[in-house]
Image (spheres, helix red, strand yellow):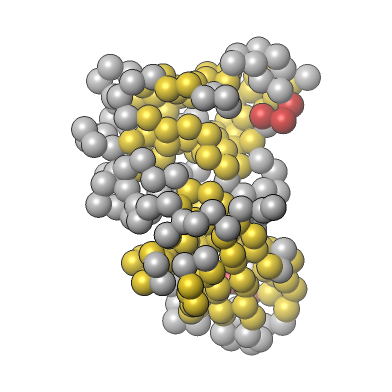
Amino acid sequence: DTAVSQTPKYLVTQMGNDKSIKCEQNLGHDTMYWYKQDSKKFLKIMFSYNNKELIINETVPNRFSPKSPDKAHLNLHINSLELGDSAVYFCASSQYRGGGANVLTFGAGSRLTVL
Amino acid sequence: DAKTTQPNSMESNEEEPVHLPCNHSTISGTDYIHWYRQLPSQGPEYVIHGLTSNVNNRMASLAIAEDRKSSTLILHRATLRDAAVYYCIRGYFGNEKLTFGTGTRLTIIP
C-alpha cells in the first residue's frame, strides 16, 4: 500500500491546456507539499499545506493552483500550460508542520511533458 | 544562509564502505542535518537525520563533527542499489521547508 501516491505518473499535453495532478497520503500526516524537479534536476518547493491551510507559497506563477480538500489529499491544477512547465512534480508529506527534525515522505513523481 | 556544500560526484566500489561528506559551516545550534537520496526515476527517499550525536539506522550512519560544521553519511557496504544522488540538507526550526541543493551523485562500481 503506497504511502504517498500520485496520479497520473505520466502526462503529455499541448501548450495552453489545463491539467491536474492528484496526490494522496495514507500516513496520517498533517502536512503536504508539492516540489518541482526540472530538467537540470533541481528540486524546488512550490507549495505546502498544513491541515488544509496554505503555509508555503513560493514564487510560482498564478497558473498553478493547489487545492487540499482534506489533510490526506493535495492536488495541483495548472492552467494554460507552457513549455517551461515540463518537469517532474513530486508530492510529499510530513507528520509535522516543519523545521528541525521533520521528515518528508515523497511520492514517485508525475512527469509532465508540454508539447 | 541555509546552504550546504557537497561534492558533485563520487565513485565507490561495490561492497566497500562509502563516506559522503557535507559542509555546513554556518549551521546554528538548533539546525538538524538531514540526508535524503534519490534513485534514478524515483522520488527522494529519507535516509537519516541528526542534531549533535552520531546516528545509526538500518540504511546508514551519520557522523557529525564536534563543531557541527560538517557531517559524513556512511554507507557501510555499498551495493549497486545505492547508486543515487545524495542530498545533505539543513532542517531548522521556524522553516517549514527542506531546501534541496545539487547533491552528490554516487556511482557504485561493480
Where does residue B16 sit, x and y in percent of width and height?
65, 12
Q: What residue appears at the point 62 percent right and 49 percent down from the top-left corner?
A: B43
Q: What residue appears at the point 72 percent right and 30 percent down from the top-left corner?
A: B81
Above-or-below relation of A29 to A52: above
Quarter of the figure with the C terminus of chain B: top right
Above-or-below relation of B63 to B3: above
Where does residue A9 sit, x and y in percent of width and height?
72, 63
Where does residue A3 sit, x and y in percent of width and height?
61, 53
On the question of residue A57 being in view, the answer is: no
Q: Give the residue at the far top of this rendering.
A: B16
Q: Is residue B36 left or right of residue A11?
A: left
- Name the foreground residue: A61 vs A70: A70
Q: Is residue A108 left or right of residue B25?
A: right
- Name the foreground residue: A104 vs B97: A104
Where does residue B75 sit, x and y in percent of width and height?
57, 21
Above-or-below relation of A29 to B23: below
Q: Quadrant of residue A38?
A: bottom right
Quarter of the figure with the N terminus of chain B: top left
- Name the foreground residue: A96 vs A55: A96
Count of numbered labels shown in the rendering: 0
On the question of residue B48 being in view, the answer is: yes
Q: What residue appears at the point 47 percent right and 67 percent down from the top-left corner?
A: A71
Above-or-below relation of B98 to A8: above
Q: Give the residue at the far left of this rendering.
A: B29
Q: What residue appears at the point 72 percent right and 17 percent down from the top-left corner?
A: B14
